[in-house]
Image: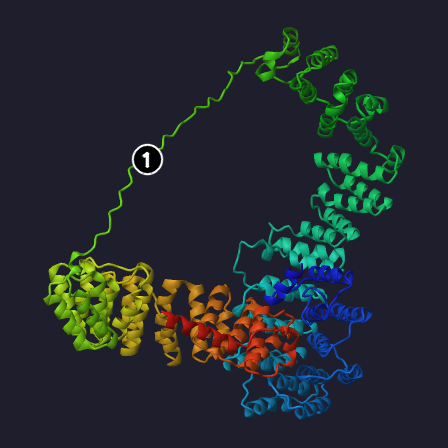
Amino acid sequence: MVIEMHKKIDYNIGISSNLFTTFYSSLKDFDAVTEQDIGFLLHVCSVGPFDASVKKRLALVEEIWNKMEELGLKPTTRLFNVKLRTYCGNKKLFNPLEELMNMKSLGLNPDKVTYQLLIEGFCQKGDIKGANLVLEAMKETDYYINLNIFNSFITGHLKAGSPEEAAKVLDILRSKNLSPNSETYFRYAEHYAEVGDIENVMKYVHEAEADNVPMSQTLLLNLYQVMINSGHGNNAENLLNHIMKIGLFNSATIQKSCQLISEGFNDAAFELYMKMPKAEEGRLTYHSGSFLLKTMIINDQSAEEIISMADKIQEVHPKSLAHQNSLLYSYRENKIDLALQLVELMHAKNHPIRPVYIVPAICNYRNNNNITGVYKAVKMLIDKTSGQDKEEQLLHCCYPALLALKQTKEDILSAFKGDDKLWNTVFFCSDIMNSGYTQALNNAKTKEDMLWLPSILEHALNRAKQNFLATELESSASVLSLISQLPEANKEGMRLLAGDLLFYLIMKKDWISTETFTQLLTDKNLKVNNGFQNMRSYADMPVSLKEKLIRISARRDFKVRPDQRAQDEAVIDRVMKGDLPSRQPNKTDPSLTKPNFMKLLSSLNDSFRKKDLDSLKQGHRELQANGFIMKASYFNSYLLKLVQLGDSETAFSLFQELRAKGDDGMLDKSVVLSLGAALIKTGNVEGTLNILKALSEGKFSCEEKFSNVDSVKTILIEAPSIKDAETLHEAIIKHKAVETSEVQKVHQFYVSRILMLSDDDEVVRYLMRLHEHYHVFPSGEKILKRFIEKKDVDRLKRVMDVGLHVFGNNYLHHLLAFSFLQSGLANKAAVIFQTPGLKLNERLILDKCQYYIKMRKVDWLSELVNITRTLPISRTQMLKHLAQGYIATQDLTKATSVIRTFLDDFIEPPKNLVRDIVRLYQNANQELPEILKPYEQVEKKQPRSEVNQSSTDEKTDDIKII
């Protein structure tokens, strides 16, 4: 449960009242409640529970705060901040000065967050003077004045009735090199929503879009709620239509509908639920509307209102289970009386009532010793239900519940006058099950005082046969005889009842009891419907019993079924062992035994070590002149060294010589490709093409540990012209210069060269050709970024079409968002991530974070973290990556600020992350910030410099010994 709560906060998913209450109740019963627990509960109340009214949320805040004081927990500045945030989030008007004095009296000092919240509190009341006083105090502390404070002052001026002053705030913040965000424009729109001025509401909605900071669906839904709350729902049609155009029915819509329900605006909630486009038509959760009913029940709305909403949902979605769901949620919330009221209303509207709708109420009343409630619910079950289920529930639920409450048969008959026969039958069946056939006969009424109810009669007889049949054969036959005389009893049903008991005795192979029971049935003129000749046990019976069974059976046309016996055939698999190939012994090269070989080889090694090209060539010629046969390793080393020393022409000549002799198998593929990369640097495209062609014709060895990607990259990136790059790209693919898994990288290198050498038309043309032949869209972000930065909408659309064909809509949108982000248009990226129907790929986003860290693009990473702040992406993972980015760039101040963000959001920072930051401070001999001190780990270790020195000394000694 705790994990679920934190996960929902982590992924920006709303928390319901049920989950919150369960979590809170578990803490109330636990003495060791921490500051983190209290703060987390208050943090949830700043935005939820989403299905609770504002009044209920604020009541929870006060209750939690009082609970904290009862437990003796000392408030901290952090707790005061989150308390003030709950007030601001729920639009509660509070006295900022009074709260500040409370903090001071406890010896607490306000921090930057406190000042911001106090300013917001003054501005919510339109008290600009008070807000300015806090602002002045904030300036004295050298705290940075950020955009949030300007947004607060917009609200303050509007609340104070000074729209002109509010408009000036935009100019002021821009003069401070700040840019308005979506929240800035929301403050203006919110004010006009409160007064029902839809024209100005839409004006600021569109201005935010024009300024590339469009309001999210959540903010727009907040505006809609403001208009509803302030009584201007009739004017909200244009706003709702706009929300429909840019958004979908999703979690945010569900939460907003529930908030409207919690405040009593049922019609507005239903309209929002109905009008929002729904992307997943198969999702019953979205289309049943059950969340509306659940919220109504949680917020104590009347049965009439709940049924009215269920009727609306049923009318729109006939297959929904709206009415049944309303009962389900009533029982879950332990609102039993409400559930029975709903049943009454459903019955009045001619809905079929099933016993299962009422049984939970009976069980609940029984558990709470509510005799009146049980009688009321049982009466409803009898009057409003029918069929076999009703009879079974009377036997198995209703009668036991009444017995548990010490009610006698006389009490029951007195309470249900007119249902005597029904209850007499229930009593009779209960006696059979629990007391046996004899006692049941003694207590039974006459046949005229009972009913033929085969379902419960059959169940009672089957339950009793295991405990009573063998010892009460005569009574059991008498019971069957009595049942057969009941009004409306039919022969077929009686044969089944009698046959079940007889079959039970036969299967136990109790031939004496079976024969006795058979004779009793015969004496009472009762038949059975079984075909005994088909039973396995039939062959073991006494002959006299067989004859009696045949006579008592109502079936005569039996055919003896042949015995079906499974024949198991053992299969033995013979494992044939093949001859293993014998190992061939290693053969030494006899050519290396000449007496002057070591001298020549030593001289050649000196040339290798000194990187003396002339000496290297001379040594190689001497080896050849003396007739020595070199191994493959020598040729690979020699060829590679020639390439490294810049003599690619000599290396290429040696390559051609070996090819002509048919000795190309001595060369490694990676070395050959290195030669091709060296040739391309000298402009020898033809030589490189010959090498690539040789790859598919020759028999080059291939070391698995070596990758050829770097050489291929050089070949393509160093291509002299775009035409050469195209030719080389085709040759690399055709002659399989790289493994299949690395072909995509080849396409990326090729596109990178295209982007370097080509104009925009050529880029599009080559990209189209590449897509036509290989169905790929390599380096998509680079291409998209190029046309985004040039604001080339036409070409951007054309390459997006290619990406759409290759990746599909979802993946392409992620690439497009990253491209906008990297082009400095983070606002556009945010809009793309909020595209209706887009399924966010968390793995892809986290991989991009890792890439930004690797490339030290921390600014991009910071923007991505900010964009995903309100999206269903793990806040913990995003903040962790941001901190790792700052660690990678040695920015300890910003890394520490991320830890502060973790704590402000009541997310526990990963221990390894905090430890790394603490270690960086210690290594830099810097004082540890106050916020990190609780995480400091004092370790007595040998100083790093001494450890390194000792390691170096040991290594040096080893070298000397060698």
| 781 left or right of 280 in image | left
Query: Which residue is tagged 1?
Result: 577
Q: In front: 169, or 671?
A: 671
Find numbered disc 1 in the image and state the secondary structure of the residue it sits on: loop
Image spot of residue 906 (x, y percent): 65, 71
What residue type is disc 1 on?
Answer: Lys
Q: In front: 640, or 114?
A: 640
- The image shows residue 347, relative to residue 292, as above or below, that is above
Which of the 4 image quarters holds residue 936? bottom right
- Rendered image coloring scheme: rainbow
| 264 left or right of 711 in image | right
- The image shows residue 175, relative to residue 573, as above or below, that is below
Q: Residue furthest top?
A: 544
- Taking the spot 65% from the left edge, 63% from the top edge, the residue there is 5
- The image shows residue 177, relative to residue 356, as above or below, that is below
Image spot of residue 572 (x, y percent): 40, 27
Image spot of residue 45 (x, y percent): 70, 69
